[in-house]
Image (cartoon, rainbow, N blue to C red):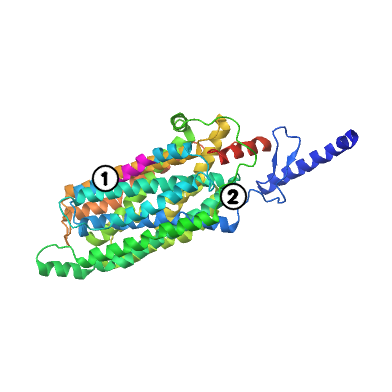
Amino acid sequence: MRTERFLEEPSRQRDLRMLMEAQEGTGDCCVSAQAGGLAPVFPPQDSRAGQLSFCTKVCYGIGGIPNQVASSATAFYLQLFLLDVAQIPAAQVSLVLFGGKVSGAAADPVAGFFINRSRRTGSGRLMPWVLGCTPFITVAYFLLWFLPPFTSLRGLWYTGCYCLFQALATFFQVPYAALTMLLTPCPRERDSATAYRMTMEMAGTLMGAAVHGLIVSGAHGPHRCEDVALAGSAVVSPDATRLYSIAAAVLALTYPVCTSLLCLGVKERPDSSGPASGQGLNFLAGLGLTVRHRPYLKLVISFLFISAAIQVEQSYLVLFCTHASRLHDHVQGVVLTILVSAVLSTPLWEWVLQRFGKKTSAFGICVMVPFAILLAAVPTAPVAYVVAFVSGLSIAVSLLLPWSMLPDVVDAFQQQHQHGPGLETIFYSSYVFFTKLSGAGSLGISTLSLEFAGYEAGACTQAERVVVTLKVLIGAVPTCMIITGLCILMVGPAPKVPSQDPSRRQSLQRRTSYSLA
């Protein structure tokens, strides 16, 4: 028996070496070795273990649709609703937007803390958080677009509703985003799942703006100003409040529908190899380590500027078309052009990202810069549609890139520091925290600038200073932010997982995949 085992050993080692060579040649993530490196660990009955099915990727992507539907509608239309329908002064609108974004940002580390300490249930650790938030966020989103009967405290009402919605959206998004690391230990499969997710989220963004815009389009047509002129004062049309309530109810239904599909089609991977070695760090200690990790710090700072630029561009485009140009009739077409361009270009950007590298694809973000300036200088319909198409290309890569680079940063950090489980949600929640905080500051300050320029809530014609301010907000401000962010991102090498032996890489991937275990 000992002789047979001795003769068998070279054959086993040769098989292991051949499998590892095949892994290096094909990029397959399904081959692993034990810590000793002497015996192969074969996947049970399937050499494709670690790969995700098409159905799993699609269902995972569908889970990201509701938040994007809601975010798209609020990004393009909430400011217009608050100013012209709810007729809140611009200074109070600034407070609403700033308070809501800060609330969402503050909820990120809180969500990361509680999720990090939660225990596994029958449906996993992350899925219960997504399911538990769904009914509450559905109600909060509807109340955000509801016009209360009182007028003096509307600013406070919408501040509370927007803060509640943003906080709940965070508790929904953080576990959903962190689920990427628990789907599979294979980086290539995670990138593929991220591409599916971003494509579905782009489709959700398109659906949110399209459905909401089509329903409420009658509330902002030319007849509104004619009615106001006849009435002699700016009054809120009952038609407008009804249309916004219908749009809110329709979009709110996407939360229970899409969450159900996510739960049915995606399962968190069980820890078949036993608990990961090492003890996990507590949240504060892990947060201190992540913010001192230079690749992560560079990624966060660069996208602070880039994401803020995109948010400013989205928030003021509809206001610009309504009050600073003669593009009232093209608002819906311009918004849809942006989103269709973004949806269709997401797979293309994923190919560019894989073919030419993530750092090279970042230059696609700055494509919108000259066109944004052109729109501010020449606000005509043909120019607006061209700018919308190019802006969609830039928005697609600006949304895809950070979520593709973040898993690389997490892997590199784990290889460098060799800490135990518990860091994925810290990375994801703190990243969203900083980007939301940046968006809060940029939107709050820019909306306040409208107050200083003399914006009149509900008015059909604005002063020339308001027109100039809107041109600056969609041209000069995003341009400066994008250029600054790209300069920071281009400094130094791109986040990259250091190459090392397969057994150590597989051990690391097991730990990072079950960091919440």
Reading the image, the residue beneath label 2 is 189
Reading the image, the residue beneath label 1 is 444
Local crowd at mark 2 within 10 Å, few (<14), some, or many (≥20)?
A: many
Residue 263, horizontal then vertical, whole percent: 51, 54
Determine if the magenta segment contains residue 105: yes
Depicted 287 relative to depicted 179: above or below: above
Secondary structure mostly seen in magenta is: helix
Determine the image quadrant of residue 417. top right
- Tell me which amino acid carries mark 2: Glu
Residue 491, horizontal then vertical, whole percent: 46, 37
Q: Nearer the viewer, residue 222 or 8?
A: 8
The residue located at (27%, 66%) in the rendering is 243
Considering only order in the chain, which callout, 2 or 1, is on the residue closer to the N terminus?
2
Determine the image quadrant of residue 110. top left
- Taking the image as shown, residue 231 lies to the left or right of residue 448, namely left
Local crowd at mark 1 within 10 Å, few (<14), some, or many (≥20)?
A: many
- Tell me which amino acid carries mark 1: Gly
Residue 107, horizontal then vertical, whole percent: 37, 41
Determine if the magenta segment contains residue 284: no
Report the span colored magenta.
100-107
Secondary structure at numbered mark 2: helix
The residue located at (67%, 46%) in the rendering is 30
